[in-house]
């Protein structure tokens, strides 16, 4: 189910991004109108009232060139899709550990291990899965229960951190693509100067502006994904700390329950 949700999100974002990109390429008249509007607004000194933020962003994206902007846009789309999938997964993995532990304790005292296992089976989240693994090996001794919890806890931590490395890849890749586009654009600008045989401010300024736009958009993408990545890391650490704390209480609960049965 999680893979399906992630796939749908990625597909939807890709469709929207490609559609906007194709419309921008196939509608040069619209681009010309935007540029004309920008020039008119600049002349009047009131550009912010004539163009919205979305229009300015779209205009600058087109000026940067689809060949360099498209990979940066793909990094943003893929990074956002993975981040959204992780946010959904981590939120679903969050459990009220105190409430769950109280339920397990009540079930153990009233109906035994089987009832406690049923509660853990019906509860979502890694904490309930760890409790179930411990209860499933209760008859083998507390030492076996501890080893089982530690081993399975490592597996669950790996699941919580799944795909985070891909997000870090897109965080690094977006500004690198932007810098590459800037360098190539500067080379093209100097080629234009060489072909013209004159260092015209118009040629230099225009070429440098287009070249630097790729770096700007690359840095924007990296900043957005970095914020989401830090949120995900904080969320994972919170869940892991909660798992470790409640596991200690769970082991103590099993020890007390075992002693009362003697």
Image (cartoon, rainbow, N blue to C red):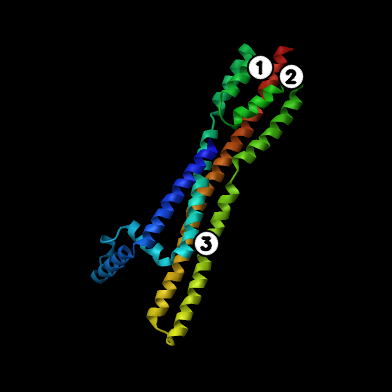
- Crowd tier of the residue under label 3, counting other residues whose Cα lies within 10 Å: few below 14, some 14–19, many 20 or above: many
Secondary element at image label 2: helix
Q: Which of 145 and 62 is in front in this view?
A: 62
Q: Is mark 1 on a helix, strand or loop?
A: helix
Nearer-N-terminus badge (1/3): 1
Kindly identify which residue carries mark 1: 113
Residue under numbered circle 2: 139
Using the rendered image of the protein, determine whether residue 251 is visible from the camera's viewpoint. no
Whole-percent x, y for residue 117 in the image: 63, 20
Q: Are marks 1 and 2 in contact (CB under 8 Å)?
A: yes
Quadrant (top left, top right, bottom left, bottom right) of the C terminus: top right
Q: Quadrant of residue 242?
A: top right
Q: Relative to 235, is 59 above or below?
A: below
| Residue 215 position in % (x across, y down) | 48, 65
The residue that disc 3 covers is 175
Residue 170 visible in this rendered orientation of the protein: yes
Q: Does residue 244 sit above or below 36 in this rendering? A: above
Q: Where is residue 166 in the image (x, y as percent from the top left)?
A: 58, 50
Q: Measuring 54% from the left and 24% from the top, which residue is drawn there?
A: 99
Determine the residue positioned at 26% across, 67% down.
Answer: 41
């Amino acid at each position: 189910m999680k893979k399906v949700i992630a796939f749908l999100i990625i597909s939807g974002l890709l469709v929207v991004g490609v559609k906007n990109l194709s419309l921008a390429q196939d509608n040069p008249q619209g681009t010309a109108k935007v540029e004309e509007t920008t020039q008119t607004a600049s002349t009047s000194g009131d550009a912010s009232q004539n163009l919205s933020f979305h229009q300015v962003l779209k205009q600058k994206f087109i000026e940067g060139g689809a060949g360099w902007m498209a990979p940066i846009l793909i990094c943003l789309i893929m990074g956002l899709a993975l981040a959204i999938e992780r946010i959904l997964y981590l939120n679903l993995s969050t459990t009220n550990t105190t409430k769950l532990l109280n339920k397990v304790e009540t079930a153990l005292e009233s109906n035994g291990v089987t009832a406690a296992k049923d509660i853990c089976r019906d509860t979502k989240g890694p904490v309930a899965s760890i409790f179930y693994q411990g209860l499933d090996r209760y008859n083998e001794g507390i030492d076996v229960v501890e080893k089982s919890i530690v081993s399975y806890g490592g597996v669950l931590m790996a699941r919580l951190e799944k795909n985070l490395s891909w997000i870090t890849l897109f965080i690094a890749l977006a500004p690198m693509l932007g810098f590459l586009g800037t360098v190539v654009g500067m080379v093209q600008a100097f080629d234009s100067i060489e072909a013209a045989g004159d260092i015209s401010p118009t040629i230099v300024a225009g070429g440098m502006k287009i070249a630097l736009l790729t770096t700007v958009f690359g840095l924007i993408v990296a900043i957005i994904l970095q914020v989401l990545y830090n949120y995900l890391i904080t969320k994972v650490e919170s869940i892991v700390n909660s798992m470790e704390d409640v596991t200690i209480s769970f082991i103590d609960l099993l020890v007390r329950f075992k002693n009362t049965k003697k």
